[in-house]
Amino acid sequence: MEQQKRIRLAQLTAAQYDAILNHCNSNIFVTDGQGMILYANDATERALNCDFAHLRQMDIYQLMERGYTSHSSSADAIRTRQKAFAVYTNNLGEEIATTSIPVMDDSGQIELVVTRSDEVGSILAQQKELDRYRSLYKEALARSDSPRETLVAEAPRMREILATLEKYAQSDAAILLTGESGTGKEVLANYIKRNSARHDDAFLSVNCAAIPNELIESELFGYERGAFTGANRDGKPGIFELANGGTIFLDEVGELSLVAQSKLLRVLENGEFRRVGGSKTHKADVRVISATNRDLKKMITQGQFRSDLYYRLCVIPVEIPPLREREEDIRPLSELFLGIFNRKYRMERRLSPELLTRLLCYPWPGNIRELRNVLENYVITGSEPELWSGSPSNAEPPLAPPPEPAYDAPLRTVLERTEQNCVRSVLERCGWDVPLAAEQLGIHRSVLYKKMAKYGLSRSARNSR
């Protein structure tokens, strides 16, 4: 029985040889030691513009004589008895890069020459695609700059969020990160990946808002050869195929079209997808983290987002607070960015009490991204930033500088005095209207009330001075 099984397996393998080689994207070409053509797969027939029935009646030298190819690496391998490389032009005017390897028999004679070749344009396209994904990976690393960046969480709310993410990172549950632009959603997605069971596997990021709707499906799922005008000659794998076994981060997922949403839903439900223009079903084992600054629930009521997809993406919802509600994080983030940019530009800029006061009093509509850009500008130019709390259309002048603090005290005391002066100045300018002052300071009114209590600030206290 076992022998019959081995024979059957051997027969099946032999029967499948041709199918396997014909499904190879590369051109496979085999000759004997004298150059007679023994085998050519379908891709080689296309590259030489000649069917195998005709090819097997020739040798490699006749191929050159009859103009099918301008050169033969197979002939070079037979002549030198070593691996040979060449680039030839076929009768269609295409450049083909080839590698031929001689296979010796027991007596040391050349028994076979196996040649693998690809169109140069296809090789360049594949290299371009590889470079693109390498660039995406480097950009993701550059945006995080340091593993410490994800650990800046002095604000209690951020500490709770990191604890939640660390708890659920080990599962494969889909996590939806929501919050304003610039709050660090991609940094947190990287944090989830590093703490997950897939930490050593691929992590690919897709900005759904940056890809036209007509291309998003091919970007996510890839496409087959000839799927559309301008497509890569050999087709292209998509993000789900490339990230198989790893993690995908779908940023700005609220920008997906309804058609793309339905395709994405199928992958999330059963792990199956098809390339654009293809009929073969592919399987993908990926963990999906998504993010958006839009109100997806509102979009559902407006018919702009599928409710079934929302519940697939939002197994674990995490709302990231804006920087104005994370005042405790402003100073450590500022020090982090100053360190990064001081090293990058070989500078030694410092965070003065006056600059920290301005940073603390500013509402940061652009969140962490804006803070980062402001500090990079400061490191490069050396000019401390002028920050306005109003909108550009009716921008107000910067707050008047608080009284010069006494520096004969610990830094913490000096900073508290500076913060107290800043809060008092804004309250006085707003006529002690707490909601308005909180808006001007860019903090929640409950935070302002706590600071007023901490520093003994009130209208009555002011009038009694």
Image (cartoon, grey):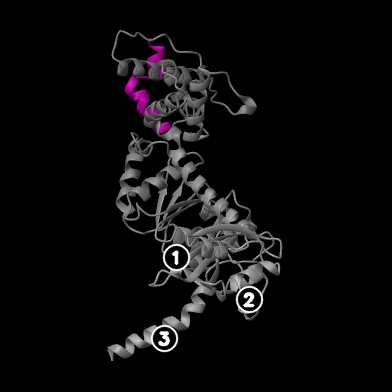
Q: Is residue 217 left or right of residue 416?
A: right
Q: Earlier in the sequence, mark 1 or mark 3?
A: 3
Residue at the spot of label 1 = 284
CA distance separating discs 1 and 2: 44 Å
Residue at the spot of label 2 = 58
Find the magenta span and give its range.
Answer: 444-465
- Does residue 264 show up? no
Residue density around tag 2, few if under 14, some if 14–19, many if 20 or more, within 10 Å: some
Q: Given this view, does label 3 or label 2 mark the residue nearer the observer?
A: 2
Residue 203 is situated, as x and y percent measured from the top left of the image, at 43, 52
What's the residue type where badge 1 is placed?
Ala
Residue 370 is situated, as x and y percent measured from the top left of the image, at 51, 32
Q: Residue at x 37, y 39 (%)?
A: 150
SS at mark 3? helix
Q: Given this view, does label 1 or label 3 mark the residue nearer the observer?
A: 3
Q: Earlier in the sequence, mark 1 or mark 2?
A: 2
What's the residue type where badge 2 is placed?
Met
Q: Residue at x 46, y 28 (%)?
A: 438
Residue density around tag 3, few if under 14, some if 14–19, many if 20 or more, within 10 Å: few
